[in-house]
Image (cartoon, rainbow, N blue to C red):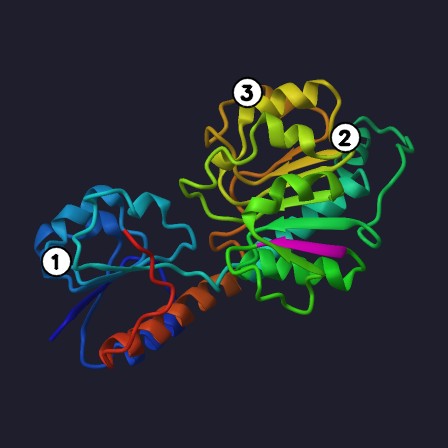
Amino acid sequence: MDTLIVVLPVNDTQKARIIEAAAGCRVIFEAPEKLTEAQLAQADMIFGNLPVQMLPLAKNLKWLQLNSAGADAYVKPGLLMEKTMLTNAVGAYGLTVSEHMLAMLMSINRHLPEFHAYQQKNEWHPFGLMRSIEGSTILTIGLGNIGGDFARKVKALGAYTIGIRKNYQDCPEYVDEMHPLAALDDLLPRADVVAIATPLTAETKGLFDRKRLDLMKDDAVLINIGRGPIVDTDALVEILKKGKFSGVALDVTDPEPLPADHPLWQMERVMITPHVAGHFYLPETKNRIVGVFCQNMRKYLQGEKLINQVAH
């Protein structure tokens, strides 16, 4: 009998779904800090982001299903055994992260952070020209579940949408143009909004360096909900000091957490949220994560290929 350890905190309804999907398996629900070495040694499958330092104790692990879409912490050479399958939760986060991106963009376009600052000073102070999503050109880097949901939403609001994706020939109806990453430099000068929704990989680390930030329009909006190291933070600070960009929205930073004395905190036109676009702050997200796992669990038991496999 295979042993499944679930380290993701779940409610009773979600537990029942997991147990049903894992019929015939021994299922253990336990917080990582309470797991024993003996339990980890018996684990054939783990559902949830087990701390990486604990992975060597899972000596018989066949499959690790992450509760995150990002898997960069788990693909370091030698961390997982070659036989261990690694899958992520891509497909679960599109709703919550795309809505966060949209909220940040609308807040910047309508100067809501500035109005809130005036409100705290009891000042009735009209502020600046506003911008609309309708008629704007929005470039999204990474047209997966998250980037695709964002592109679909802004397209419905009247934007002209451009996407960058590896499989760029597959262009959904809500994307006006699809391109490969190699076209990025040609596309940046056209975009009113640049939204980064791609994972952190060797190819995307430092993708937005000083050169590419310079290529963007002076009044563009930059959104990053991918990973902090995709954007060169020092170059971003330098370029903001010169007055470039109408707004920058960051849910991820480099370093992260952002130190209290970092200049980004106090810079005008910068909106920072503490990596909360995803996670489980929207309850539906965890239901979707459990759904991804249950689909994979049934495939695992039937000997079928798992979805969302990540190479390591």
Percent from the top left, x then y, of residue 26? Answer: 17, 72
In this figure, what is the number of numbered marks? 3
Q: Earlier in the sequence, mark 1 or mark 2?
A: 1
Q: Are marks 3 and 1 in contact (CB under 8 Å)?
A: no
The residues bearing labels 1 and 2 have C-alpha atoms spaced at a distance of 56 Å
* Quarter holding residue 241: top right
Secondary element type, mark 1: helix
Q: Residues within 10 Å of mark 1 (few under 14, many from 20)?
A: some
Q: Residues within 10 Å of mark 3 (few under 14, many from 20)?
A: few
Q: Is residue 163 on the magenta stretch?
A: yes
Percent from the top left, x then y, of residue 91? Answer: 48, 64
Q: Which residue is mark 3?
A: 262
Residue at image position (75%, 47%) is 106
Q: From the viewer's side, name the closer residue of 21 and 80.
A: 80
Q: From the viewer's side, name the closer residue of 290 and 161.
A: 161
The residues bearing labels 3 and 1 have C-alpha atoms spaced at a distance of 42 Å
Residue 229, which numbered label? none
Q: Which residue is mark 1?
A: 39
Residue at image position (63%, 50%) is 140
- Judged left or right of residue 193, residue 49 is left
Residue at image position (46%, 32%) is 256
Q: Earlier in the sequence, mark 3 or mark 2?
A: 2
Q: Is residue 67 on the magenta stretch?
A: no
- Judged left or right of residue 10, residue 45 is left
Q: Which residue is mark 2?
A: 218
- Judged left or right of residue 273, residue 91 is left
**Main secondary structure of the magenta stretch:** strand
Mark 3 vs mark 1, foreground winner is: 3
Percent from the top left, x then y, of residue 196? Answer: 58, 45
Mark 3 vs mark 2, foreground winner is: 2
Amino acid type at image mark 2: Asp
